[in-house]
Amino acid sequence: MASVICGSLAFDTIMTFEGRFAEQILPDQLHILNVSFLVPGLRRDFGGCAGNIAYSLNALGGRALPMAAVGSDGADYVQRLKELGVGTEFILQLDDSYTAQAMIMTDRDNNQITAFHPGAMQQAHLNRIEAREDIRLGIIAPDGREAMLQHAAQFKAAGIPFVFDPGQGLPMFDGKDLAHFIDQADWVVVNDYEGRMLSERTGWSTAEISRRVRGMVVTLGAEGCDVWVGGEATRVAPVTPEAVVDPTGCGDAWRGGLLYGLEKGWDLVRCAELGNRLGALKIAQRGPQNYQVDRAALGL
């Protein structure tokens, strides 16, 4: 079984600010904000939601097929995915744009400020999902607006169950758009902030959304996550990481665990438990795709 992972492939430039943003940004001066942060630590990583989720699912032993677009600078990323054993047949390479770029600054409390250049991601809708015997699962992760709309409709038309995971792309859609995504999807995954926005824009409570799909998960960071099925919630306890080093890509690692469990036919609580373990592995390492997975230790 293969999972099509619709979302971005991006390069992450990650900067470390040794202070606290809250000590540098004055709330009563936001209308004339002009600040500069000294960032002694800087590195460049492979990232993007589709790439990060694919890395996680592949490390668990699942078959990941990211569907994304990269620019003229994306050849190294595509080659790396091939070397990892990740399928690249649905990656579109464009010569007239850059690969998406995220500039992420993290303070000592793991708060983040991110600037994102979408680049080739804006053309991701040129990829198309078709029914195929080996493709049994999909996910709509943050991507270009048109790609998210079209790919959701294509998953539905092809009869491929999929997860709606709007993430940071959620603000691009109004209540009508979001309600249509939910009505097409089989599962919905959001963090607690996104969950509140989703409910506000659709007018549906979390319980009501969960009754419209096979299940919904609201991730809660260090507090674990809530799994909603049929209007009832189950709290899934967090997993304490060995160290809190870098939160970048933690949610994507979690989603790789979710997809692996769904591929295996697990119930949503068991999927979330594996996701929490993957998130704990990732947060203890720098970069979204640098952690190692011991499948035997995970009981897989």
Image: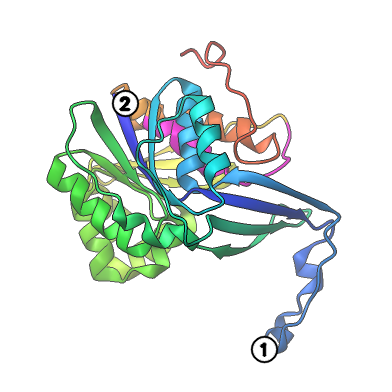
Q: Is residue 271 magenta?
A: no
- Residue found at x 49% / y 41%: 51
- Residue found at x 73% / y 34%: 243
Quick check: 255 above or below 142?
above
Quick check: 28 above or below 201?
below
Q: Which residue is mark 1?
A: 31
Q: Amino acid at mark 1?
A: His
Where residue 178 sits in the image (x, y, percent)?
28, 63
Q: Amino acid at mark 2?
A: Glu
Image label count: 2
Quick check: 169 above or below 30?
above
Q: Is residue 208 visible?
A: no
Mark 1 to mark 2 CA distance (whole Å): 49 Å
Where's the N terminus, which quadrant? top left
SS type, badge 1: helix
Q: Which residue is mark 2?
A: 263
Q: Are marks 1 and 2 in contact (CB under 8 Å)?
A: no
Q: Quadrant of residue 129?
A: top left
Q: Is residue 18 visible?
A: yes
